[in-house]
C-alpha cells in the first residue's frame, strides 16, 4: 500500500520542486518575487491514485470516505485524460512521469548532495531579503549597509522583499558565490553556512542535474575555517558608530 502512495508522493514532490525552480527562474528573469505559497498545490496534496493505461491517464484525488453504520459514502474529484485528444500534452505528462520514475529509481542517491559538491553555488544566484542580509551581517560582524554593499548585487523587487542577490567572486554570474570556500570540487563548503540565505537553505538536491557525478557520496568530509571579511583600516570604529 505504502509503495504506491509513497511513489505518488515522491512524484508529486518532484513536480513541486521542478515548479519551484521555475518560479525562481521567473523571479530571476523579471525581478518579480514569487514563493511557493503562490502556487495552488491543494489539488495535488490529496491524490489517491494515478492510473496509466494504454489509453488513459486517470488521476483520482480529494477522495473523501465517510463511514456510516453499514455503508460508506465516497465522494471524490476525478480527472481523466484520454490519449490522442492532445498528443503534445500527453507526451509532456509522460515525460514528467518518466522523469519522476527515473529519480525515484535513483533514490536514495538523489536525496543527499555528495560532500563537497557546490555546483549550485556557481550555477545560481541566491536572492536575499533584508532578513537574510541582516543575519549575514550579524554573522560576519559587519553592519547591514556594509554587507549589502560588499556582498549583494542590489536589485530590489517591486514589493521590497528581495533586496538583491549574492555576488560572485568576479562579475561573471557563472562564477562561484563570494562565500564559497574550499580548494575545489569535493572540498567546497559554504563559508557562512549558519547564516546562509533562505534561498540556499531551501535548495534541494532532489532531481538536481548539476551534481558533480565524479564525487563519491561516502567518505569523510572536512570543513575548513569560515569566511572572514576583510576589514579596511579604521572600519571597526566607523562600524560601531554606524551600526543599525
Ligand atoms: S551562500 Fe553558501 S550555500 Fe549559498 S551560494 Fe553561497 S556558498 Fe553556496
Ligand atoms: S548535488 Fe546539486 S544541489 Fe547538491 S551541492 Fe551539488 S549541485 Fe548543489
Image: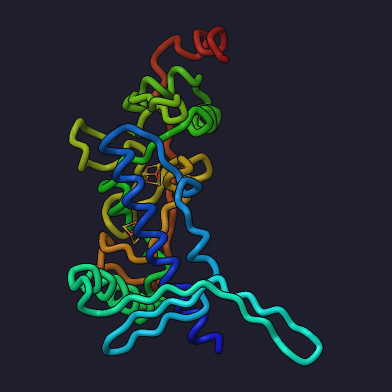
Q: Position of residue 226 (x, y in %)?
A: 45, 41
Residue drawn at x 26%, y 53% as measured from the top left: 184
Q: Is residue 1 above or below residue 162?
A: below
Foreground pick, 163 / 179? 163
Q: Is residue 149 above or below residue 193?
A: above
Q: Position of residue 99 (x, y in %)?
A: 29, 73
Foreground pick, 217 / 167? 167
Residue drawn at x 55%, y 85% as measured from the top left: 2
Whether residue 25 sits left or right of residue 205 in the image: it is left
Foreground pick, 179 / 206? 206
Residue 230, by quadrant, is top left
Number of callouts in the render? 0
State the residue lying farthest toward the right.
69
Residue 1, by quadrant, is bottom right
Q: How is the image coloured?
A: rainbow
Residue drawn at x 34%, y 80% as measured from the top left: 57
Q: Is residue 133 above or below residue 113?
A: above
Q: Position of residue 53 (x, y in %)?
A: 32, 88
Q: Regarding ligand 2, which quadrant of the image does it lie in? A: bottom left
Foreground pick, 178 / 59? 59
Q: The C terminus appears in which quarter of the rendering?
A: top right
Amino acid at each position: 500500500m505504502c509503495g504506491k502512495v509513497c511513489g505518488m508522493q515522491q512524484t508529486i514532490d518532484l513536480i513541486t520542486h521542478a515548479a519551484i525552480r521555475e518560479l525562481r527562474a521567473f523571479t530571476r528573469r523579471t525581478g518579480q518575487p514569487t514563493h511557493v505559497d503562490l502556487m495552488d498545490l491543494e489539488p495535488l496534496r490529496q491524490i489517491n491514485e494515478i492510473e496509466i493505461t494504454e489509453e488513459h491517464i486517470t488521476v483520482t484525488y480529494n477522495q473523501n470516505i465517510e463511514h456510516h453504520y453499514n455503508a460508506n459514502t465516497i465522494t471524490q474529484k476525478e480527472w481523466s485524460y484520454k490519449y490522442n485528444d492532445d498528443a503534445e500534452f500527453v507526451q509532456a505528462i509522460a515525460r514528467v512521469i518518466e522523469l519522476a520514475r527515473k529519480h525515484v529509481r535513483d533514490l536514495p542517491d538523489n536525496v543527499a548532495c555528495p560532500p563537497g559538491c557546490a555546483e549550485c553555488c556557481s550555477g545560481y544566484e541566491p536572492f536575499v531579503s533584508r532578513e537574510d542580509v541582516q543575519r549575514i551581517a550579524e554573522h560576519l560582524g559587519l553592519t547591514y549597509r556594509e554587507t549589502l554593499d560588499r556582498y549583494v548585487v542590489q536589485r530590489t523587487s517591486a514589493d521590497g522583499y528581495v533586496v538583491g542577490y549574492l555576488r560572485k567572486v568576479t562579475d561573471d554570474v557563472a562564477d562561484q558565490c563570494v562565500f564559497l570556500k574550499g580548494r575545489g570540487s569535493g572540498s567546497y563548503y559554504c563559508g557562512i553556512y549558519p547564516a546562509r540565505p533562505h534561498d540556499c537553505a531551501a535548495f534541494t538536491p532532489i532531481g538536481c542535474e548539476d551534481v558533480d557525478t565524479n564525487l563519491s557520496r561516502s567518505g569523510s568530509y572536512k570543513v575548513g575555517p569560515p569566511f572572514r571579511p576583510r576589514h579596511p583600516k579604521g572600519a571597526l570604529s566607523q562600524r560601531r558608530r554606524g551600526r543599525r
